[in-house]
Amino acid sequence: MNDLPATGPAFPTGSSSLLLPGPAGAIELACTLPTEAPPRAGVAIIAHPHPLQGGTMHNKVVTITERALLELGLATVRFNFRGVGHSEGVHDEGVGETDDLVAIGTWLRAQRPGDTLWLAGFSFGSYVTLRAASRLDPAQLILIAPPVGRWDFSMIGAPTCPWLVVQGEDDEIVDAPAVFAWAEALQPPPQLIRMPETGHFFHRRLMDLRGALKNALAPNLPPTRA
């Protein structure tokens, strides 16, 4: 489908929630600005896990990813997929959700034209994020526990930007060896972080995830804002 025009509300000057017009109706966003690090010329969109299995933008892996990126100085945008929270529409097996993500990215580029765009996703959100990468051309891609084998990744090529995959070795939902084999077969391959003794939802390992993200992403950060 055609991307929506880059219209909608202004990006907030402080951390707040808003509704953005999307392909299936309003999309609920939570926009947050860094306060503990020098602001950088970049903004990251973070996509949540499967909405039909309880996934929302308030998921703990999503919020710890947000925290890591804020501590690196990026602004962040979490959002609810269609049919979740105050987002309108119904679940669309990743297709409409990709359109929603592209609409958010298009809006952000219009609102913050001097910023680089990063994309991050957890579980189902990482599938949608990878699907959207070819249309949004982000500067950095972050996939956490991508559900290889549960969703069809075979037709999605590797992004051209730097990309990071984080996968727990004891994931009870995603086949970790399948993720490792998929990531290592792609060209260019991603930076791959294997987290031992770590399940799908990173229980008791959220702080480790936060540190791993910050260490891996620090070399690729955009410059501080002028």
Image (cartoon, grey):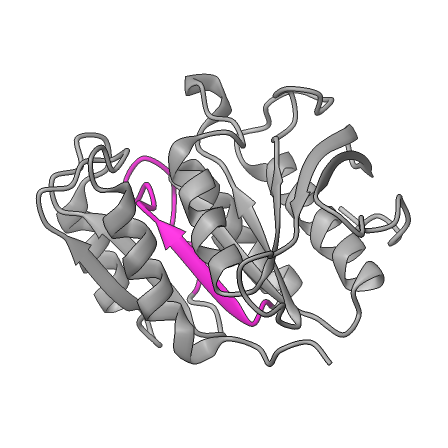
Residue at horizontal 89%, vertical 44%? 8
> Measured along the vertical axis of the image, is residue 4 above or below residue 86?
below
Residue 7 screen position, x and y as percent: 91, 49
Is residue 34 in view? yes
For the stretch drawn in magenta, the main secondary structure is loop
Picture quarter with the C terminus: bottom right
Residue at horizontal 45%, vertical 40%? 62
- Relative depth, front residue between 135 and 209: 209
Residue 170 screen position, x and y as percent: 11, 39
Q: Residue 202's quadrant in the figure? A: top left
> Measured along the vertical axis of the image, is residue 128 above or below residue 89?
below
- Relative depth, front residue between 204 and 54: 204
Residue 157 screen position, x and y as percent: 44, 63
Is residue 154 in view? no
Residue 142 horizontal side relative to residue 96, left or right: left
Q: Residue 94's quadrant in the figure? A: top right
Residue range highlighted in magenta? 138-157
Residue furthest out toward the front: 36
Residue 37 horizontal side relative to residue 107, left or right: left
Residue at horizontal 78%, vertical 64%? 112
